[in-house]
Image: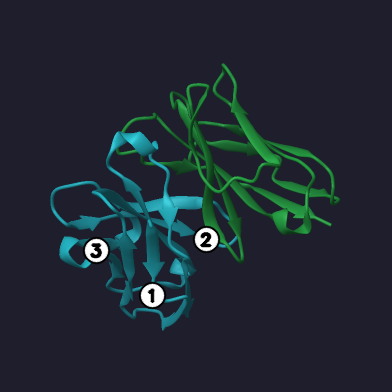
Amino acid sequence: DSGVTQTPKHLITATGQRVTLRCSPRSGDLSVYWYQQSLDQGLQFLIQYYNGEERAKGNILERFSAQQFPDLHSELNLSSLELGDSALYFCASNPGFPPYEQYFGPGTRLTVT
Amino acid sequence: AQSVSQHNHHVILSEAASLELGCNYSYGGTVNLFWYVQYPGQHLQLLLKYFSGDPLVKGIKGFEAEFIKSKFSFNLRKPSVQWSDTAEYFCAVNAKSDNQGGKLIFGQGTELSVKP
């Protein structure tokens, strides 16, 4: 158990819908990262927040957004969902300074039908 | 462009065989290196990491990896695999510099199947 929690574990929804994935980092960690794991794209970095502010952005679609709240939990919002958004979404956390070793949560499996 | 390449997509071994999984990276700067393991249906777990110093690093469950700077490689090894090592293995890098926030670039993963 890494200490990073994610909810829900599974999510099944229809195309065009909007969902919110939640992540709570390890105690004391200020930085949260979101990754998408799909069969065709592999593991890809989406976005990082550090102490409430966006720090780095990767291959994140405009339909996706994220935020980090004062209690340091983070939410990833996915809207206008498409079949291709079906994937495992992982969150990871660390204290926010080098070497940035990351601890991963159990993931949320999103299925868009 | 930053990238990580894992040479083997699927490796099948018998128990007690030796394992070596290849990983090469392309990155315009100095990096930290990681190997993660993902057991079926589970999340990514850190196997081992290299930041600096001795290029031969030991991780959990008997795994080790060697960083060869001249070859931009960080191969994972285990002398004798067990059935419980069946999993997917990911090599990853991030920049040592502070300006990229530590995002990880992952390889495509290598699926290891160990036959009992």
The chain shown in cyan is which?
A: B
Which residue is under mark 1? B7
Q: Could you tell whether A102 is left or right of A17 in the image? A: left
Which residue is under mark 2? B39
The chain shown in green is which?
A: A
Q: Position of residue A97 (x, y in %)?
A: 33, 30
| Disc with the residue nearer the chain's start (3 vs 2) | 2
Chain ID for label 2? B
In space, the residues marked 1 and 3 are separated at their CA atoms by 13 Å
Most foreground residue, A101 or A17: A17
Q: Secondary structure at mark 1?
A: loop
Which residue is under mark 3? B72
Quadrant of the drawing holding the N terminus of chain B = bottom left
Q: Could you tell whether A104 is left or right of B68 in the image? A: right
- The amino acid type found where label 3 is placed reads Phe
Chain ID for label 3? B
Q: Position of residue A103 (x, y in %)?
A: 45, 41
